[in-house]
Image (cartoon, rainbow, N blue to C red):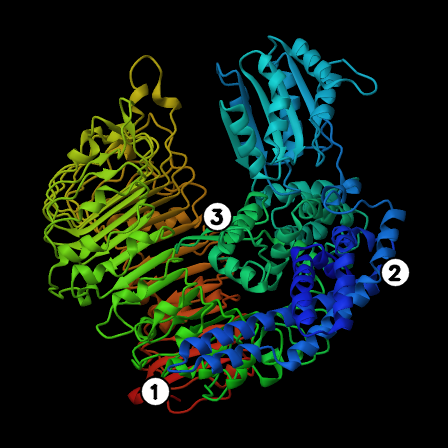
């Protein structure tokens, strides 16, 4: 059976086919009946009659195709019929939109001409294709009874029941007995669970969830806990129940009773089961372990199951494993007492290696297979943290103890081939089959992105919408975006996606094995051609609908007739620009594209024929390093005929100054637009934006002429996010009311911005008339020059995010609502901070604030935070982050700061009069960041409520992970928590100390107690003194050491770091005391990145060695540095740098005193050197003739090569070359 059958069957199981068939019945009957096309009318009625049968079969095709191959032809026929019908229906909708736009644009047209156009709007071509689509569907439905018969004969139940029945053969049966020979890793997780189960608690019933994707080792961990709890004897009864996908309250209750020794035969009344369970566990402390739980919806079933368990003794616990975070949330809300959970992540490489070896060498002595172990270590790196994959692959290799076979596995792009390794695919597909069919479609769409891709939630949802994957019923008021977000969160909760914070906000990634699953289940429907795919012999199947491909291979799509989504990526190599280059050839224009996304790093122009893409809903161009003369350079005028278009984007890092400000009167023709993400120069030129009533987001520039005034916003009541610039152009408060903001109930985010220094008239009256609806969640006001705040700021009960910027004349703000999560006050003339209040009456003695973040930046009049942080009637239990910057008159923080037990991040910068910090900080603090302060003492850490009494603080653990101390000239010693011995600081992994010019003392052994320290930076602390035991300064886990001008501590730091096998990144700058780099054997063994600059005595040594041709001998370290950065070429002549043989990136920042490159050094790195950069090469006269032998070289950049006249032959591998000679001429 071919792969496309699988993907097509899954497509049919989705919402698309059902929706299309129903629409063709409704619309087809209407259109064809009006035109008296009785033959087609009869065909539509036959389709309508078959519709219930079609619905019945949609959920069984995937299972049926594994049992009977005769359904493949029907699946293919039905798929083609659905696609054709969908296109025709879409074109019918398009003609309606086209007619509406023409009517709107018509000036002075007669009523008769308008009527004539409406009558003729449905062209003959569309009607013919509608008839053909109906005929195809009619033929396809003729075979539906045969397919149903096959399903019945195969014992397959119809949709929707089969959605869960499909996994019957894949159900797991687990017991409390450990099947593993040994449990590797998970020590932290074990300790957390055991600690939770053995804690002292008076809770009537609590729960603990172990959450993770399939194959992460949840069951093994639960089995270990079972055995450990039996050993410890903390519970009177320990019960193990394997739940699996089918959740039956009766069945689970019966299993619990069986574990307790009471077995019921036959159909026992449920009431009797529950009474028996209540009696069995009454006043007994029990631990119930529910393994492999899936049910995340039926709250009533959970409540029934839990009811008799509440009669157990206090301290009883339910421990459960699940792939679905929703299960943990649901069970926590049902039990409604103490709850905890942990999400399993990938195993560490070392632990994974032990697990892999236990299977791969089972029955063998590993010491006799050293060569195999070396290959196995490399294979483990590609297993990607999955315990299941390590076990399955280890077992596979155990039966093939042949080095050639192991090497073949290693060389595969993916060592885990889901089709071959049955255990992995079964586990992962079980989760996939339990997704609703419409969410399965959305999951498969993710496969067109490259492995490791970082997903933006909003972007992905827009693409799903444009592709037609979002099912929106006609009676639903819910936006498709909201449904898409539900789909996305469902995938997130069920571990198909994971959080990934990249600095720009929340992003999401897909685990490598889950990505392979997506590719597996989408094969034949989705296709991705990678940048490295040079093969043109592989023909893309005609069944493919969604494609990602580099522009260099786009002609490979010319034979495809029904592409729905196309993502085009340009080649990474930089070439001479071609202003006439079209990324999208005309051969692809007349297709069924819904989504077109193009990543561009070269000049190009879309063809005018893009206007023929009548189905297109998503058009996005992302630019990189492009200089373009105008918007029309990318988008021809024909795009204004794309009446279905929902998303139009032109984004990227490009200079926007060349865009001309020409009035754009045609953008308003795109009446389906929901999102415009365009440069500001374009947005300000759009005329008549009021016609775009579907817009969800808008950046609007207020102008003074018709089509640009604020009243353009009056009818845009679907807006969710609105940014208004140039508010100074609003003439009066009456004109401001024309924006109709108060009636925009759906508006969630509003930004109001005056141009800085505009000296606008009546700003207080204008802002008063721009009152938003009370539903507003996010508010930003910028460059407001009024002296009074708008009264409506007090009446915003739903407000969660407030950003005030540039209020120089405002010395006070109103009391703010307790609903606020973030408050940012920047460049405001406040004398005192506002307080928080509750907008409605309450009998609660103390009110709870939702505030998590408070930022105060550039508030020169603010002297204290006491009024805000010391409110008697409000608790700040959620307060997590405080940012204070550029507050020159701020002199103190309240000592009560230590009582904020939820605070996690403290950032204070450029407050020169803040001479001291609170005496102590809470243990909850994660980030301690101070910069530009006059403090001489650092604070301590402790948990205030526990300081009294006899309990020792030695058991307290600090959460502190990140420590930044910069520009503190009064700090003489690292005191405070650095010298504190009564707190465990094992969480600290980054310490950065910079520009502390008077810092002298670092306590002896201070860094050693930070056992998790991985990154240490010490910069410009020239008065630091050496310490005793200088060879043992740094903890064993250190990975990165950056040092610059560290006084007498330079040499001890370098010597101490040399023996650390974990060190991978070393940077040495302006360290005058360093005269050599340790080069004996076994030093810097794993160092991969080295940077040296400004070390004058090292340069002197290198020149001496060069002059005397000093031979250091053979007893030297052989470093494996991959990335080398130096400021002088002469450093390549000293040990151990002269001995390097694996450098792939070399940067020389100042080539002084050398006329030629070190030829021998280049040749010994010829197989690995990819990028060579030499800056300020003013004395360089020539490049060696052997440059052509650098066969790995891809990029060559040389600047200021004033004496370089000509170039030798360069290697064929070179993709990018920039060599600037005298006068900045390009060679």
The vertical placement of 251 against 1169, above or below, is: above
From the viewer's perspective, tell me whether residue 326 is left or right of residue 831.
right
Q: Which of the image's four quarters has the C terminus?
A: bottom left
Report the disc number at residue 697.
none
Query: Which residue position holds label 3?
Result: 1062
Could you say which is closer to the camera, residue 318 or residue 659? 659
Residue 957 percent coordinates (x, y): 39, 29
Instruction: In the displayed orientation, state which residue is furthest to the bottom.
Output: 1205
Give the CA distance from mark 2 to mark 3: 59 Å
Residue at the spot 37% in from the left edge and 22% down from the top edge: 954
Q: Of the residues tagged 1 and 2, which is closer to the observer?
A: 2
Q: Disc 1 or 2, which lies upstream in sequence?
A: 2
Q: Of the residues tagged 2 and 3, which is closer to the observer?
A: 2
Residue at the spot 61% in from the left edge and 14% down from the top edge: 235
Check if mark 1's residue and mark 3's residue have beta carbons within 8 Å: no
Q: Disc 2 or 3, which lies upstream in sequence?
A: 2
Whether residue 931 is visible, yes or no, is no
Give the CA distance from mark 1 to mark 2: 70 Å
Could you say which is closer to the camera, residue 676 or residue 19? 19
Residue 1067 percent coordinates (x, y): 36, 57
Report the disc number at residue 70.
2
How many neighbours does mark 2 have within 10 angstroms: few (below 14), some (14-19), or many (20 or more)? some
Residue 208 percent coordinates (x, y): 55, 27
Report the disc number at residue 1221.
1
From the viewer's perspective, tell me whether residue 7 is left or right of residue 531.
right
From the viewer's perspective, tell me whether residue 75 is left or right of residue 1011.
right
Could you say which is closer to the camera, residue 913 or residue 1057? 913
Image-quadrant location for residue 359: top right
Q: Secondary structure at mark 1?
A: strand
The vertical placement of 335 against 247, above or below, is: above
Whether residue 120 is visible, yes or no, is yes
């Amino acid at each position: 059976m071919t792969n496309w059958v699988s993907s097509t069957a899954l497509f049919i199981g989705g919402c698309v086919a059902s929706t299309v068939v129903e629409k063709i019945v409704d619309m087809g009957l209407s259109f064809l009946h009006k035109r008296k096309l009785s033959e087609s009318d009869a065909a539509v009625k036959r389709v309508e009659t078959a519709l219930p049968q079609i619905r019945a079969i949609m959920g069984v095709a995937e299972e049926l195709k594994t049992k009977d191959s005769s359904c493949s032809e029907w699946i293919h026929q039905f798929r083609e019929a659905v696609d054709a019908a969908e296109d025709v229906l879409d074109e019918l909708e398009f003609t309606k939109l086209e007619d509406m736009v023409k009517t709107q644009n018509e000036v002075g047209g007669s009523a008769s001409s308008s009527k004539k156009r409406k009558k003729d709007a449905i062209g003959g071509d569309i009607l013919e294709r509608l008839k053909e689509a109906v005929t195809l569907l009619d033929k396809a439905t003729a075979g539906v009874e045969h397919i149903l018969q096959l399903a019945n004969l195969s014992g397959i139940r119809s949709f929707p029941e089969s959605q869960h029945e499909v996994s019957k053969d894949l159900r797991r049966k687990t017991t409390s007995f450990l099947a593993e020979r040994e449990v590797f890793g998970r020590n932290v997780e074990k300790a957390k669970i055991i600690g939770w189960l053995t804690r002292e608690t008076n809770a009537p019933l609590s729960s603990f969830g172990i959450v993770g994707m399939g194959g992460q080792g949840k069951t093994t961990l639960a089995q270990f806990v079972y055995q450990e709890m039996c050993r410890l004897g903390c519970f009177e009864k320990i019960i193990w129940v394997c739940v699996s996908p089918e959740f039956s309250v009766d069945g689970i209750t019966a299993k619990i009773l069986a574990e307790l020794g009471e077995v019921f035969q036959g159909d026992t009344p449920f009431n009797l089961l529950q009474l028996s369970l209540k009696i069995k566990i009454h006043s007994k402390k029990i631990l119930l372990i529910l393994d492999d739980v899936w049910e995340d919806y039926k709250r009533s079933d959970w409540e029934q199951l839990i009811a008799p368990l509440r009669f157990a003794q206090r301290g009883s616990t339910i421990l459960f494993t699940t792939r679905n975070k929703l299960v943990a949330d649901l069970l926590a809300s049902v039990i409604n007492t103490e709850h905890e959970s942990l999400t399993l992540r990938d195993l560490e490489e070392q632990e994974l290696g032990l697990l892999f070896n236990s299977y791969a060498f089972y029955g063998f002595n590993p010491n006799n297979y050293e060569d195999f172990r070396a290959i196995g270590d490399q294979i483990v790196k590609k297993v990607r943290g999955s315990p299941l994959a390590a076990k399955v692959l280890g077992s596979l290799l155990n039966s093939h103890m042949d080095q050639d076979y192991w090497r073949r596995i290693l060389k595969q792009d993916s060592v885990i081939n889901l089709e071959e390794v049955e255990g992995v695919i079964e586990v992962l597909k079980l989760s996939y089959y339990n997704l609703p069919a419409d969410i399965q479609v959305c999951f498969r769409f993710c496969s067109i992105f490259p492995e490791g891709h970082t997903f933006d939630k909003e972007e992905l949802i827009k693409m799903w919408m444009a592709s037609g994957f979002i099912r929106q019923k006609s009676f639903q008021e819910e936006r498709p975006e909201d449904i898409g977000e539900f789909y996305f969160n469902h995938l997130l909760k069920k571990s198909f996606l994971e959080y990934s914070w990249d600095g720009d906000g929340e992003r999401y990634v897909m685990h490598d094995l889950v990505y392979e699953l997506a590719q597996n289940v989408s094969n034949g429907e989705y296709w991705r051609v990678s940048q490295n795919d040079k093969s043109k012999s592989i023909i893309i199947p005609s069944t493919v609908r969604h494609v990602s491909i580099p522009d260099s291979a786009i002609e490979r799509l010319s034979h495809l007739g029904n592409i729905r989504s196309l993502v085009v990526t340009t080649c990474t190599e930089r070439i001479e620009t071609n202003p006439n280059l079209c990324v999208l050839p005309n051969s692809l224009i007349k297709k069924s594209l819904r989504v077109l996304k193009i990543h561009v790093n070269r000049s190009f122009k879309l063809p005018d024929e893009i206007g023929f893409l009548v189905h297109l809903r998503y058009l996005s161009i992302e630019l990189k390093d492009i200089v373009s003369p105008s918007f029309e350079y990318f988008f021809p005028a024909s795009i204004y005929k794309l009446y279905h278009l929902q998303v139009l984007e032109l984004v990227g890092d490009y200079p926007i100054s060349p865009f001309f400000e020409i009035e754009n009167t045609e953008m308003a023709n795109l009446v389906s637009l929901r999102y415009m993400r365009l440069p500001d120069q374009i947005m300000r030129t759009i005329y008549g934006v009021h016609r775009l009533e579907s817009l969800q987001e808008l950046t609007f520039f207020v102008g003074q002429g018709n089509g640009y005034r604020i009243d353009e916003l009056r009818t845009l009541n679907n807006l969710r996010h609105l940014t208004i610039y140039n508010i100074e152009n609003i003439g009066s408060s009456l004109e401001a009311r024309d924006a109709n903001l108060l009636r925009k109930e759906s508006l969630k985010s509003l930004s109001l911005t005056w141009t800085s220094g505009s000296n606008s008239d009546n700003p207080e009256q204008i802002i008063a008339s721009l009152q938003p609806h009370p539903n507003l969640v996010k508010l930003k006001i910028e460059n407001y020059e009024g002296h009074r705040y708008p009264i409506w700021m007090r009446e915003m009960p739903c407000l969660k995010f407030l950003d005030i910027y540039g209020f120089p004349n405002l010395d006070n703000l109103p009391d703010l609502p307790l609903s606020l999560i973030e408050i940012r006050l920047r460049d405001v003339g406040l004398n005192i901070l506002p307080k928080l209040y509750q907008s409605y009456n309450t009998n609660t003695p103390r009110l709870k604030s939702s505030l998590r973040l408070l930022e105060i930046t550039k508030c020169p009049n603010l002297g204290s935070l006491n009024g805000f942080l010391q409110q008697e009637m409000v608790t700040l239990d959620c307060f997590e982050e405080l940012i204070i910057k550029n507050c020159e008159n701020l002199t103190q923080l309240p000592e009560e700061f230590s009582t904020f037990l939820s605070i996690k991040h403290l950032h204070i910068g450029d407050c020169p009069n803040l001479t001291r910090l609170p005496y102590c900080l809470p243990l909850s603090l994660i980030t301690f960041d101070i910069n530009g302060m006059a403090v001489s003492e650092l604070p301590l850490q402790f948990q205030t409520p526990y300081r009294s009494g006899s309990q020792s603080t030695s058991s307290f653990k600090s959460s502190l992970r990140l420590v930044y101390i910069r520009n503190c000239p009064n700090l003489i010693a690292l005191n405070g928590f650095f010298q504190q011995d009564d707190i465990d600081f094992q969480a600290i992994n980054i310490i950065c100390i910079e520009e502390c010019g008077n810092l002298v003392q670092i306590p002896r052994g201070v860094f050693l107690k930070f056992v998790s320290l991985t990154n240490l930076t010490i910069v410009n602390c020239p008065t630091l003194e050496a310490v005793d035991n200088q060879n043992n300064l740094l903890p064993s886990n250190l990975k990165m050491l950056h040092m610059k001008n560290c006084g007498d501590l330079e040499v001890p730091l370098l010597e101490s770091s040399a023996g650390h096998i974990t060190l991978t990144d070393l940077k040495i700058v302006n360290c005058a005391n360093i005269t050599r780099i340790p080069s004996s054997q076994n030093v810097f063994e794993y160092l991969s990145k080295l940077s040296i600059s400004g070390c004058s005595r090292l340069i002197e040594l290198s020149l001496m060695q060069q002059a005397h041709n000093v031979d250091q001998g053979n007893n030297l370290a052989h470093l494996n540095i991959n990335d080398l950065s130096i400021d002088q070429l002469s450093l390549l002549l000293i040990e151990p740098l002269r001995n390097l043989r694996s450098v792939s990136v070399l940067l020389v920042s100042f080539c002084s005193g050398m006329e030629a490159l070190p030829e021998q050094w280049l040749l010994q790195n010829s197989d690995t050197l990819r990028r060579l950069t030499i800056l300020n090469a003013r004395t360089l006269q020539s490049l060696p003739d052997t440059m052509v032998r650098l066969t790995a070289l891809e990029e060559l950049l040389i600047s200021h090569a004033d004496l370089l006249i000509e170039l030798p032959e360069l290697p064929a591998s070179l993709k990018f070359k920039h060599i600037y000679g005298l006068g900045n001429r390009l060679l």
